[in-house]
Image (cartoon, rainbow, N blue to C red):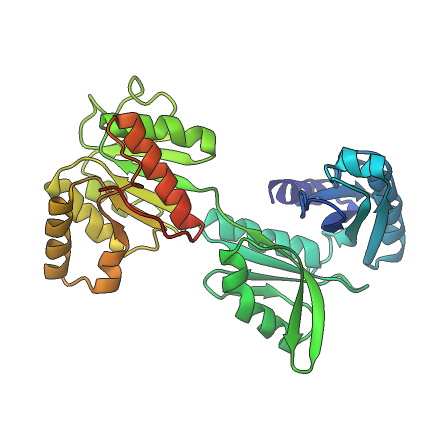
Amino acid sequence: MTLTSERITELRASRRRAAVATLIATTGGAIRRLGETMWVDDHGAIVGSVTIGGCVDGRAVELAEDVLRSGESQRTSLALGDEDAWAFGMTCAGNVELLVEPVDVAVARDAVSCAADAVRDALHSGRSALEAAALGSTPRRLVVIDDGTTVGTLGTTELDVAVARQASTLIDTRAVGVVAVTHGETTTEIFVHTHAPPPSVIVMGATDVAVALVRLAGPLGFHTTVVDGRDRFANRERFPTADALHVGMPSEIMAGLSLTPATALVLVAHDFKYDIPVLEVALRSRVGYLGVLGSRRRADIIRETLTGMGFGTDDIARVHVPIGLDIGARTSGEIALSVLAQLIAVRNGKQLVAER
C-alpha cells in the first residue's frame, strides 16, 4: 500500500494521469506477490513492477498506455513459457492475470485514488481494510474498514453489501486474490486485497526477558515498544533496537498508546501493582494479543482479581497466562522465543499449548 499512497501523492503534485497494472492471479505454479503494481503515467514514467521484468512487465506497459488512451479498465491473462515462469518464481509454465485501471487524481471520485486515501487513513488509525476492485471495463473500487465503514462502490448496492458482509472473514484470512461474490441471483468476480497495519509488540517491564523479546521481534517485522517506570532499566543501552521507549506509570502510558488488533501486549514486569492496572486498560481495548509472565498460581490470582473487578469470562480468556508456548523454556531468550511463537500463532488463528 505504501507505493500506491506515494504514487497518488506524486500524481497530485505533478497533475498527471496514470494507469496502474495489478497482478491479480497466477496459475501453473506457486502464487507469488499478488497485489504487486506497476504505474505508468501519461509522460511514460514507470514506477514499480508486477514481476521481475521481462515480457510480462513489457506487456503491462503496453496495456497501461491503451488504458490511458481509452479511460477503460482491462483484465487480461498472459501466458508464460517455462523460462519466463522460472524467472517469475513459478515452478512451471502457466498464466498471470493483470488488472489495468486508469487513474485521474484530478477527478474528485476517481476510484483508485479514493480507495488509496481510504486505506491510508485506516492504516494510520490502526485499522485493517479490505480493498475490492471491479474487474469490468469501468474502474470501480470499494474499501471496507474493519469497523464496517465503507468507501466507494463496485457498481451496485447489492454487490457492495455482499462484499461488506464477507469483509470480516476476508480480512481475518488476509485475503489477496480474485474471489467470487454472490449477490441476489448473480455471482461476480472481484479482486480483493487486505491491508493491515504493521504488527507491533508493546512490552511492559524492562526486564531481561523484555531485552530478548525486543531483540528477536525486530527482525520478524514487529514495531517494538518498551514501557517501564524506571529509566535505569528502560534505556537505549539495554534496548538499542527498540522503536520506542516510554518511562513513567505503565497504566497511564498504556492508556495513551494505540492498542489495536495488530498489537501484542506482553507483561513481563512480574509485579501485580503494575500488571493489574495495565490489564484493566488493555481489556477495554481492541488489543490483538495479551500475555502475562507468571506461574499457574499467579495466573489464578490474576483471574480472580479481574473477576472481582467485573470482567467477564470472555474478557479474562483473552489473557494468556502463563505466557508462551510449552517448549520447555528456561532462559530469557527461550522464554522470549516461546512468547513470540505464541503471539504469532494467535494472530494466525492457531490454538497451541501454553507454557507450563
Residue at figure coordinates x 46%, y 53% from the top left: 127
Q: How many marks?
A: 0
- Spot occupied by residue 103 in the image (x, y as percentages of width and height): 75, 52
Residue furthest to the front in view is 328
In the displayed structure, 144 sits above or below 295; it is: below
Can residue 245 be seen in this snapshot?
no
- Spot occupied by residue 108 in the image (x, y as percentages of width and height): 69, 59
Residue furthest to the top in view is 237
Q: Quadrant of the N terminus?
A: top right
Q: Is residue 124 left or right of residue 24?
A: left
- Spot occupied by residue 62 in the image (x, y as percentages of width and height): 89, 45
Q: Is residue 116 left or right of residue 83?
A: left
Residue furthest to the bottom in view is 185
Q: Residue 56 or 4: which is nearer the viewer? A: 56
Q: Residue 167 or 281: which is nearer the viewer? A: 167
Q: Residue 39 or 60: which is nearer the viewer? A: 60
Residue at figure coordinates x 69%, y 55% from the top left: 112
